[in-house]
Image (cartoon, rainbow, N blue to C red):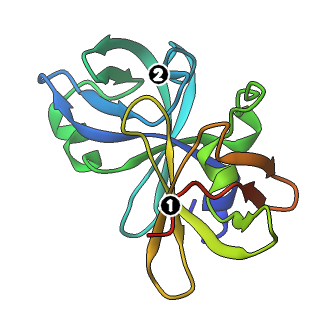
Amino acid sequence: MTNSNAALNFLSVGKIANTHGVRGELKIFPFTDFPEVRFAKGKELILTSPEEGTQLKVKIVSAREQKTVYIVKLEGYDNINQVEKYKGWEVKVPKEEAVEAEDNAYYFHEIIGCTVWTEQGEELGSITDILTPGANDVWVVKRKGGKELLIPFIESVVKEVNIAEKKVRIELMEGLLD
């Protein structure tokens, strides 16, 4: 099943980092706050090739956490040679399976693409990426002049997030535009 619009209907929940052992297990680096839900036994995942967008539906037989990755065994894959080709592939789920975000918590796909405005009504640019360096996320804003602006996702800066209108209103901190 290949479809250029298919990416819009799925959430990326991880990436296949490598194989594990010789019995067909995969090391998946999770991009989700709910890996225990996403990689539970019996769950279905969509493996997506980064090059041609080819998609493959698979079912989890077992999964366990190991440091920063999940070791996942897929139904029908019992040998390293069968899974070797999936290294680097994205791991996705249908968008309908999104876990409801808590208040003041947002999914990356909801924030990326939002336009950022100051409280004074000045448009600063649109959010192109989200960094997760530690205590709080940092939103990367592409400005019209091409320069990037880094906005910390903290209450004193981010005043309003309107997902429906794809708008974010911020209070400029001193030094933020330097």
First of labels 1, 2 by sequence position: 2
Q: Residue furthest bottom?
A: 145
x and y percent of residue 100 in the render?
A: 76, 27
Which residue is located at x 46 percent, y 84 percent? 146
* CA separation in Å, label 1 and label 2: 45 Å
Q: Reply above or below: 66 against 104.
A: above
From this viewpoint, which residue is outermost toward the right? 164
Type of residue at label 2?
Ile
Total marks placed = 2
Residue 153 coordinates in the image, percent (x, y): 58, 42
> The residue under label 1 is which amino acid type?
Leu
* Residue tagged 2: 60
Residue nearest the viewer, comparing 120 with 1: 120
For disc 1, the neighbor class at 10 Å (few under 14, some 14 to 19, many from 20) is few
User: Which residue does the numbered mark 1 point to in the structure image?
Assistant: 176
Mark closer to the observer (1, 2): 1
| The residue positioned farthest toward the left in the image shown | 22
In the shown orientation, is residue 75 left or right of residue 117? left
Q: Which residue shows up at 71% across the image and 34% down it?
A: 98
Point 19% across, 43% down: residue: 84
Q: Quadrant of the N terminus?
A: bottom right
Circle 2 SS class: strand
Left/right of residue 16 with respect to residue 154 in the rendered view = left
In this view, 97 is above or below 72: below
Give the residue at x 67% y 42%. Answer: 94
Mark 2, Cα crowd under 10 Å, few <14 / some 14-19 / many 20+, is some
Please provide percent x and percent y for residue 125: 63, 74
